[in-house]
Image (spheres, rainbow, N blue to C red):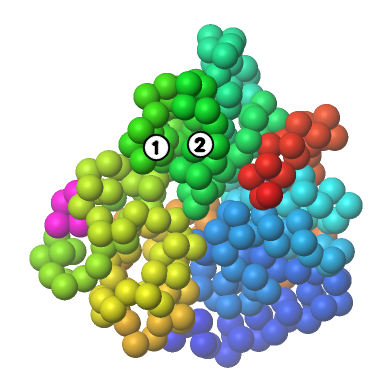
Amino acid sequence: MASESSAVLEQQAELRRLATERRAVILAHNYQRGEVQDAADITGDSLELARAAAATDAEVILFCGVRFMAETAHILSPEKLVLLPDAHAGCPLADTITAEKLRALKRDHPDAAVVAYVNTAAEVKAEADICCTSANAVEIVARFPAEQPLIFVPDRNLGDYVRRQSGRQNMIIWDGFCHVHEDITANDIEQARAHYPDARVLAHPECRHEVLERADVVTSTSGMLRRPATDPAQTFIVATEVGLLHRLRQLYPERTFVAASRRATCPNMKLTTLEKAIVALRDGVTEVTVPPRVREGALRAVQRMVE
């Protein structure tokens, strides 16, 4: 396997050596390349990595993910040096909503509270009352009184899922989407089931409603990683970014994991390579910071989510 080649092992060892030298912690999202995940101290979803960033005593955080994640790490740990291996690793979903657009929405709905998915820029978080992840969005929305209008940004599929799960009709949902999850179709699920009729279908709530309707379990990536521990199924069809299959196969080598769609690859997540991570730690690039005024507002929303 490529991940076991001598060149990859040498790069992983060099990255680990630099991390020790720089007193750095390496955080990697579940959607990163397998060889990057294998070199990390901690892998996880957005919430798990946010908590890790807040708790670490390392001097440097090397965040193998995308920009909004590195921003969240700086928001929680402003005294630490936060590095992003590729400056161009952004998130098209996060880019669909800006602070200016959210302020306009708030003016149109002055009585509404704002729940911002963590997949947003720091400036957007600063305009929100609370942040959420796919793992806790339903729980967080349930904390608001039933009569409280809510603005939910920016993912329309996650917002629709939360609305259906909570029974709330007073949600104003921003019309953004993750193209990776949006591109998984009902036909993909049906074709996968035809090949694996006994498989359990796990779907991320950023997927379309037609996909969620056909899933056995709708859950976050962290939920998907826990599911096989208590589920007797031998085969799982996984409707999320394909990077998650690497960790699933490591955790449960005796099970079979199949991507619901081979198209479900996030090019931004795959921008990070071991070589770029080594350069980032060695040279201290690219540093990610958030202006103090923005950080102050965003911190309140993120802390409420983490707590």
User: Which is nearer the eye, 149 or 14?
Assistant: 149
Q: Quadrant of residue 159?
A: top left
* Left or right: residue 81 compared with residue 73: right
Q: Quadrant of residue 169?
A: top left
Q: Residue at x 67, y 26 (%)?
A: 127
Is 187 magenta? The answer is: yes
Amino acid on which the number 1 mark rests in the picture: Ser
* Left or right: residue 155 compared with residue 291: left
* Left or right: residue 11 compared with residue 94: right
Viewport quadrant of the N terminus:
bottom left
Q: Is residue 124 visible?
A: yes
Residue 59 horizontal/vertical position (percent): 87, 64
Q: Residue at x 61, y 65 (%)?
A: 28
Dot 2 or dot 1: first in sequence order is 2
Q: Say if mark 2 contacts mark 1, CB within 8 Å.
A: yes
Amino acid on which the number 2 mark rests in the picture: Val
Q: Quadrant of residue 294?
A: top right
User: Which is nearer the eye, 163 or 118?
Assistant: 163
Q: Is residue 87 visible?
A: no
User: Which is nearer the eye, 3 or 188?
Assistant: 188
**In the rendering, which numbered label is found on residue 235?**
none
**In the rendering, which numbered label is found on residue 166?**
1
* Left or right: residue 53 compared with residue 199: right
Would you place residue 109 above or below residue 126 in this image?
A: above
**How many residues crowd mark 1 within 10 Å: few (<14), some (14–19), many (20+)?**
some
The residue wearing badge 2 is 141
Q: Which residues are magenta?
A: 185-190
Q: Residue at x 58, y 27 (%)?
A: 114
- In this view, which residue lies farthest toward the left? 194
